[in-house]
Amino acid sequence: MSTALAPDGRLRCSWCLATPQYLAYHDDEWGFPVIEDRRLFEKLCLEGFQAGLSWRTILEKRENFRHAFAGFDIEVLAAWGAPEVERLLQDAGIVRHRGKIESVLNNARRAQELVRDEGSLAAWIWRHEPAAAEQAAHQGVTTSPTSIQLSKALKKRGFSFVGPTTVHAFLQSMGLINDHAENCVVRGQVDAARAALRRPG
């Protein structure tokens, strides 16, 4: 992954310099480890909405998504059905794709089952964290052995819109791998956050 000079004169992953919004997301969120079920579920859903679109589109609508989907509360969404789908299809603030909207509600029910079986969504997802030796091999790619494995595991549990590319982007953003470029100023911060993290389990 390449780097470029940001407005403050420090090197960052070049992709984040496209917009100020990307830069803030890169510096404050992308790659920092997340162990809260709701945030993990939200990101998995938003990555599913991104399929075929740009992350910029989703990021610009993220607050609208949060409002429309009850803050991505798994218990609330698991109880929604056809009336809510029809209402969401009229919401111009989100991506109005029936399959992706229905997927969020399905995935909430699957997440609910997973929490009952495993204790938490976070504990189960973090069991798929790549070993240290694999981390470098995952940098700068769009799929990885781990994303393929996790995608299969999610699909086996009934989740949808969780292909290997979607799942790899999820792993990058939620800090299960550090995909910041080697000389990106944020890479060390993410490494420190990962080193200090108490993995759920």
Image: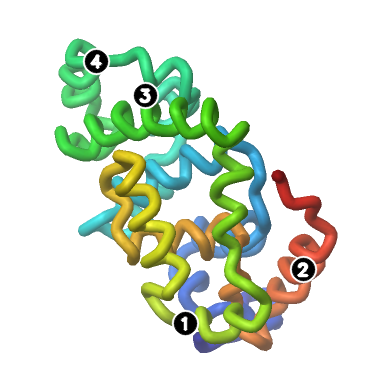
Give me the C-alpha separation between circle 2 and circle 1. 18 Å
Q: Earlier in the sequence, mark 2 or mark 1?
A: 1
Residue at the disc numbered 3: 68
Q: Earlier in the sequence, mark 4 or mark 3?
A: 3
Residue at the disc numbered 2: 189
Residue 40 position (above or below residue 104): below
Tell which tag, 4 or 3, sits nearer the viewer: 4
Quarter of the image where the C terminus is located:
top right
Indicate left or right for 83 with 7 as reference.
left
Q: Earlier in the sequence, mark 2 or mark 3?
A: 3
Q: Secondary structure at mark 3?
A: helix
**Which corner quadrant of the image does residue 142 belong to?**
bottom left
Outermost residue, right direction?
196
Residue sitting at x 32%, y 47%: 156
Tell which tag, 4 or 1, sits nearer the viewer: 4
Give me the C-alpha separation between circle 4 and circle 3. 14 Å
Q: Earlier in the sequence, mark 2 or mark 4?
A: 4
**Which corner quadrant of the image does residue 115 belong to?**
top right
Residue at the disc numbered 1: 140
Tell which tag, 2 or 4, sits nearer the viewer: 4
Indicate left or right for 7 with 104 as reference.
right
Residue at the disc numbered 4: 81
- The spot of residue 51 in percent (x, y) is 26, 55
- The spot of residue 197 in percent (x, y) is 79, 55
- The spot of residue 163 in percent (x, y) is 29, 58
Give me the C-alpha separation between circle 2 and circle 3. 33 Å
Residue sitting at x 39%, y 52%: 153
Q: Earlier in the sequence, mark 3 or mark 1?
A: 3
**Which corner quadrant of the image does residue 96 belong to?**
top left
Tell which tag, 3 or 1, sits nearer the viewer: 1
Q: Are marks 2 and 4 in contact (CB under 8 Å)?
A: no
